[in-house]
């Protein structure tokens, strides 16, 4: 007695949902309806958001009118802004101190918009050349300070690492103490920079 082959499953219904795709595409083309993705203008996005009962987030792109999630790298402009703030800084607690140069600034800066709220994310390594003036315009001491800046740290950085390269007639310990008086002002500068960076539209 011959063995019968097992019955093959029917494929008559396979992809049946796609059977009329060509006909639908022809109909849409005949009616002048485009199915290609369209870039929304700000006005169109605002109208769409208003029609849906929502409002356009000021920090979201047109395609993301609800501001549910958006992320953008802003490292170059953020670095430039921080450099400018540091170079123009004054230090009331240590008025003889000035920033001579920002010798190193590395690490990425991102703006992250989640449900209309923007957060500035960063993990930076900063090194600054400083000078301590004397009366008459001379330089009593010079060196560098450095810190690792992190958005996850409530204090922005753990410790200011101060190095002295020259200290003409001033003890090294006194110089370090005078530079470390700038600690609070530096944290304030970074907080101001975060606030200004966060205010920039995506």
Image (cartoon, rainbow, N blue to C red):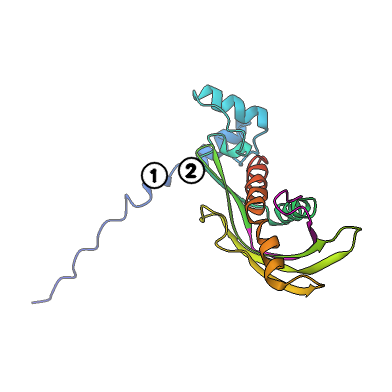
In the picture as drawn, the residue positioned furthest to the right comes out as 136
Residue receiving disc 1: 17
Whether residue 60 is situated above or below residue 173 in the rendered picture: above
Using residue 66 as the reference point, say whether residue 128 is left or right of it: right
Whether residue 16 is situated above or below residue 166 in the rendered picture: above
Q: Secondary structure at mark 2?
A: helix
Q: Secondary structure at mark 1?
A: helix
Quadrant where the N terminus sits is bottom left
Q: Is residue 105 magenta?
A: yes
Quadrant where the C terminus sits is top right
Toward which corner of the image does residue 172 lie, by quadrant?
bottom right
Numbered mark located on residue 120 in the image: none
Rendering coords of residue 138 (x, y %): 89, 63
How many labels sit on residues?
Answer: 2
Rendering coords of residue 41 (x, y %): 68, 33
Rendering coords of residue 140 (x, y %): 82, 67
């Amino acid at each position: 007695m011959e063995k019968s082959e097992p019955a093959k499953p029917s494929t008559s219904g396979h992809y049946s949902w796609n059977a009329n795709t060509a006909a639908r595409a022809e109909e849409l083309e005949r009616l002048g309806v485009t199915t290609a993705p369209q870039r929304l203008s700000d006005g169109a996005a605002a109208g769409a958001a208003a029609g849906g009962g929502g409002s356009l987030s000021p920090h979201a792109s047109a395609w993301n009118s609800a501001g549910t999630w958006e992320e953008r790298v802003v490292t170059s402009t953020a670095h430039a802004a921080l450099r400018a703030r540091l170079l123009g800084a004054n230090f009331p607690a240590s008025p003889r101190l000035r920033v001579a140069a920002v010798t190193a600034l590395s690490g990425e800066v991102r703006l992250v918009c989640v449900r209309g709220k923007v957060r500035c994310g960063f993990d930076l390594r900063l090194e600054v050349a400083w000078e301590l003036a004397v009366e008459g315009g001379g330089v009593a001491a010079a060196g560098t300070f450095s810190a690792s800046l992190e958005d996850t740290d409530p204090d922005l950085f753990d410790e200011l690492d101060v190095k002295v390269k020259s200290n003409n007639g001033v003890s090294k310990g006194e110089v370090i103490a005078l530079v470390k008086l700038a600690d609070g002002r530096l944290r304030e500068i970074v907080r101001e920079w975060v606030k200004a960076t966060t205010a920039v539209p995506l």
